[in-house]
Amino acid sequence: MKVTAIIPAYNEEKRIEKVIDPALKTDMLSNIIVVDDGSEDLTSNIVSKYNVDLIKMPQNSGKTAAVKEGIKYCKDKSDIIVLLDADLIGLTPNHIKSLILPLLEEHFDMTIGIFKSGRYVTDLAQYIAPNLSGQRAIKTHLADEILNLDITGYGIEVALSKLTRKHKLRVENVILENVTHTTKEEKIGFAKGAIWRIKMYKDIIKYWIH
């Protein structure tokens, strides 16, 4: 059973090592791919220090495009694909394994990681909208379906949730204890972060009502 982790990243030089390190220590992972989505910082330089595959996109195209690029790269040589955000805090190999293990059973197609006991702000967001979690494991028989999704920007998680309903996929929610992530407001300031968040929600709502 070959399991590949895909980590889409944009300007995550200060945070990505906290995701790569536990991924490399996860013995269930066969390969790790970081997709640098046109970063303007040293993200690629940091990633290059590690024994992982690095895909550098020529320009920033959004998380959906980065995830699709990673899936194209590995879909023919993987049985399970794990999606991990590049700004996670508190991630451990056991968290990653917990996303994978249900898919080793015949009756699950996808897992969704839900934050708990990390930070109130991120716990609450995922409690309200668990379908927006970026931490997932997916069987690769869904790869072509994902690549054919007509969506760009920040709506990949909503698109995956719609896909599960359309095909009546069997999904297991997995609690990720003590895991959180850095908010956009913390990365780039409140004002810019708020503008980014509005754009993200517009992308999500646009796809959701499509």
Image (cartoon, helix red, strand yellow):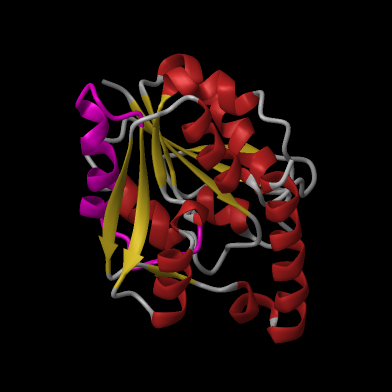
Picture layout, residue 129 above or below residue 122: above
Does the segment drawn in magenta span residue 96?
yes
Does the segment drawn in magenta span residue 208?
no
Q: Is residue 9 left or right of residue 175?
A: right
Q: Is residue 190 left or right of residue 108?
A: right
In the image, residue 4 lies at what x, y percent? 39, 32
Q: Quadrant of the C terminus?
A: top right
Picture layout, residue 112 above or below residue 194: above
In the image, residue 50 lies at what x, y percent? 43, 47
Residue 81 position by quadrant:
top left
Magenta-colored span = 86-109
The residue lying at 48 percent from left, 14 percent from top is: 76
In the image, residue 20 lies at what x, y percent? 40, 52
Picture layout, residue 3 above or below residue 153: above
Number of marks in picture:
0
The residue lying at 69 percent from left, 69 percent from top is: 197
- Judged from this view, the residue extending furthest toward the bottom is 190
Q: Nearer the viewer, residue 33 or 179?
A: 179
Picture layout, residue 96 above or below residue 194: above
- Judged from this view, the residue extending furthest toward the top is 76
Q: Quadrant of the N terminus?
A: top left
